[in-house]
Image (spheres, rainbow, N blue to C red):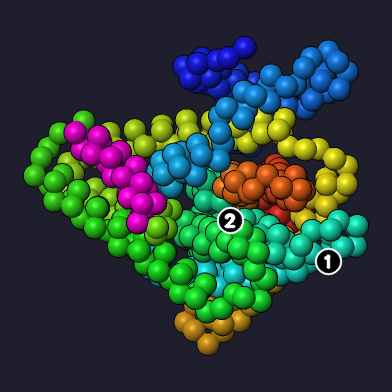
Amino acid sequence: MELSTLQLLALLFSITSIGGYINHKVFRFPASIGLLFFSVLLSLVLIVMDKTSAFSLQSVGVLVNKLDFENLLLHGMLAVLLFAGALHVNVTELKAYKLPIALFATVGVMLATGITGVLFYLACQALGMDLPFVYCLIFGALISPTDPVCVLALLGDSPSIKNIKTKITGEALFNDGTGVVLFIVLLGLVHAGQPVSSLDWSVLLLIVKDILGGVVVGLALSFALYLAIKSIDSYEIEIMMIIALALSSYALSELLHVSAPIAVVTAGLFIGNRVRHLAMSRKSTEHLDAFWSLLDEIFNAILFVIIGLEMVVVVIKLDYVLVGLVAIAITLLARYASILVCALGLIRSRYDFNFRRTPLLMTWAGLRGGISIALALSLPNDQYKPLILTATYVVVLFSILLQGLSFNRVLRWIDRKG
């Protein structure tokens, strides 16, 4: 049966609402994790019913594919989610750790991509999977950046790890720019049929150009909006203009081929730390906070439900799942190693870095999420895509469900160990 866009949205909101209700009454997990858990269970039930011929999964797969998760997230929802997340981040705290955040979001992601790619290649060879090295690096690029949506949902208000939280949040907001550029460059090698050895310093220059370009776009549009908002006092118009800013900064950056995530994060930081204090009345800021908090919750809920439902379109083969389980250990090890290497560069700096506690916490709090899945879905439909997509999905599920649910316990364990 062909569903209209309205019917599809109605179904999606209904599933999300039912999942939220069941989580509140039964699971009692944090909202995002509970919704993902519910949608994964729903997907598993549908898959089992399909295997027993009690139900045809094909129609559900068609509906999930119609959602076009890759396009929906990377060219839609992400703009709203990143802006909402950045809106409430304190720039003063970010500035206090600007060097560590910059290192983790750039050098750290590149190191993690390389380490993950090499180890993933060796693991695939050991398990009899003939996956070219460039595809292993592509997997490293899409899985290495931490997901800002998941990280912000996990950390919430955690005063006991305030300093580390600032580093993790700052890294998560900015490391997508590095990861996406690496992903695009490596995918370009596949399309051009060129070897990995053809990469040179131009990749680093491209990353810098993308990041700086995104910052310029975000600041320019935000400053123009600041001048406009300063001349009026109407919270309805102000909020409408800020919505336009969030969407326009992302869309314009895509047209200019600079980092759209960086642009929208920059815009969110500027609005949250400057415009709200210098150009908006108290009534306007109250409405601004209420509106974006609600929008953030709704979009987060829908995102995690869709992530769970994507299971019905993932090719579930036992050997692919096994590779995914090995990839969990690889991504954790690669993240820990990359953080440790970046930290070594901070030894002689003024930044206080606990080499025993901080790398462990940043590794376990570095959740992967929808962005990784969306990038995996954007891969060309060749023989290697199912393996990479399955491995990505396994890592993301482990990351959100296991790391997310156990984070506070791990935090207490690390604190006891000193």
Q: Residue furthest bottom?
A: 348
93 sits to left or right of 42: left
**Could you tell me residue 391's position as x and y percent?**
75, 49
Membership of 240 in magenta stretch: yes
Instruction: Give the residue type at disc 1.
Output: Leu
The part of the image, by quadrant, that contains residue 200 is: bottom right
Element under disc 1? helix
Instruction: Give the residue type at disc 2.
Output: Thr
Q: Quadrant of the C terminus?
A: bottom right
- Residue 122 badge: 1
Q: Residue furthest front?
A: 193
Residue ID at (8%, 44%)? 231
Element under disc 2? loop
Query: In the image, which residues are magenta?
Result: 237-256
Membership of 26 in magenta stretch: no
Q: Is residue 306 above or below residue 349?
A: above
- Do the residues under discs 2 and 1 have CB atoms within 8 angstroms? no
Residue ID at (44%, 39%)? 76
28 sits to left or right of 259: right
- Residue 146 badge: 2
The part of the image, by quadrant, that contains residue 314 is: top right
